[in-house]
Image (tube, rainbow, N blue to C red):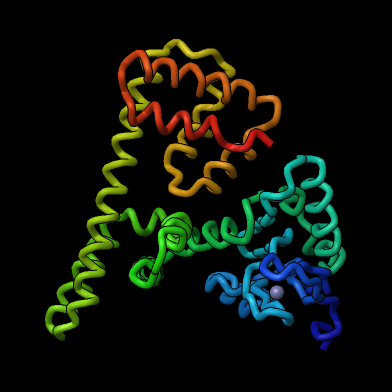
């Protein structure tokens, strides 16, 4: 069996880590490359949000490891690389992607070394990779979509604090802000009523109210920004080029997402983005739109790296 003797495509490596909770160093095996065909089990772990989650041997704190990871799907001819947000220079990111890619390509037989391997799409962190894969799975299968909605709604019902809520929202925004999530919560509330589970019923109703408030806030923000952009027209070419990034920031529910959108903008375009945000803020002030103004101020307060 020649297959068995082939070099493994998926690759794990010992990494020196420092526990963010207790500060002590420890070594752990971290996945650097995952080949979907070779290790579908690892893809499931990734989709469950459990990949590269480590437990500190000193204090027991558990957390995800921030490490670049390359994902390869030969059927789709797709390469995605999860990149930690802490890596901010494009050169450093390119170098890390290059190293991982080299080791993958070296493990592929010559007939599988196709041109698509030259194109790697970079996504922010493992969460970004997970979100991209979930989105793919969803568009391919409605049954999976229902399952993912149920999962997201379940997570939402289990959150305890503001912070966790923000994280769950950021991770599953598209699913949670869909009509399906609302239907799922109605079903849960009805089921809870039938079984007399008042606590669950209250939580489901509360979650539904919060989601609907989110939807209307996002909608109001989009409308306000569209009006402001119209009022600033005509935009320069440089400004038009950064409008998509602005829209991504607008839809974000978590500061980390806003930050990810900002660093995804090419460094030479960032001054245009900042200038456009400034112009929009001035316009919002002139038009007495306090909500839009507050949002734009928050964008300006983000770390400018
Ligand atoms: Zn620790």
Q: Quadrant of residue 84?
A: bottom right
Name the residue: 53% across, 73% down. 48
Which of the pair 19/38 is nearer the observer? 19
Quadrant in which the N terminus is drawn: bottom right
For the question of whether residue 205 can be seen, the reply is yes
| Ligand 1 quadrant assignment | bottom right
Name the residue: 22% across, 77% down. 199
Query: Residue 192's x, y, as percent?
Result: 18, 79
Name the residue: 61% across, 80% down. 41
Q: Quadrant of residue 63?
A: bottom right
Q: Quadrant of residue 75?
A: bottom right
Q: How many marks?
A: 0
Q: For this view, does 234 lie left or right of residue 212? A: right
Which of the pair 113/80 is nearer the observer? 80
For the question of whether residue 9 can be seen, the reply is no
Does 38 sit above or below residue 228?
Answer: below
Q: Which residue is the extreme one toward the front?
A: 22
Q: For this view, does 50 lie left or right of residue 6? A: left
Quadrant in which the C terminus is drawn: top right
Query: Residue 164's x, y, as percent?
Result: 45, 63
Does 257 sit above or below residue 183?
Answer: above
Does 151 sit above or below residue 68?
Answer: below
Q: For this view, does 192 lie left or right of residue 7? A: left
Q: Which residue is the extreme one toward the top?
A: 234
Name the residue: 42% across, 42% down. 251
Query: Residue 284's x, y, as percent?
Result: 37, 20
Which of the pair 297/221 is nearer the observer? 297
Q: Which residue is the extreme one toward the bottom?
A: 1
């Amino acid at each position: 069996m020649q297959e068995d003797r082939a070099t493994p495509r998926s690759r794990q490596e010992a990494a020196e880590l420092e526990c963010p909770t207790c500060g002590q160093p420890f070594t752990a095996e971290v996945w650097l490359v995952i080949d979907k065909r070779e290790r579908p089990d690892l893809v499931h772990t990734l989709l469950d949000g459990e990949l590269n989650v480590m437990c500190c041997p000193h204090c027991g704190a558990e957390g995800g490891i921030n490490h670049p990871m390359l994902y390869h799907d030969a059927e789709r001819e797709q390469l995605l690389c999860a990149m930690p947000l802490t890596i901010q220079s494009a050169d450093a990111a390119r170098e890390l992607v290059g190293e991982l890619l080299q080791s993958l390509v070296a493990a592929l037989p010559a007939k599988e070394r196709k041109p698509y391997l030259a194109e790697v799409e970079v996504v922010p962190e493992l969460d970004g990779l997970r979100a991209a894969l979930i989105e793919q799975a969803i568009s391919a299968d409605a049954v999976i979509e229902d399952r993912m909605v149920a999962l997201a709604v379940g997570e939402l019902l289990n959150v305890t604090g503001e912070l966790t809520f923000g994280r769950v929202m950021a991770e599953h925004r598209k699913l949670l802000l869909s009509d399906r999530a609302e239907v799922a919560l109605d079903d849960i509330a009805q089921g809870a009523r039938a079984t007399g589970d008042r606590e669950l019923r209250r939580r489901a109703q509360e979650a539904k109210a919060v989601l609907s408030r989110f939807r209307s806030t996002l909608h109001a923000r989009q409308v306000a920004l569209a009006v402001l952009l119209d009022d600033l027209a005509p935009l320069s070419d440089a400004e038009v080029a950064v409008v998509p990034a602005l829209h991504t920031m607008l839809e974000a529910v978590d500061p980390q997402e806003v930050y990810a959108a900002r660093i995804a903008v090419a460094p030479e375009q960032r001054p245009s983005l900042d200038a456009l945000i400034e112009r929009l803020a001035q316009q919002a002030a002139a038009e007495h739109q306090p909500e839009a103004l507050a949002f734009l101020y928050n964008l300006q307060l983000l770390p400018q790296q």
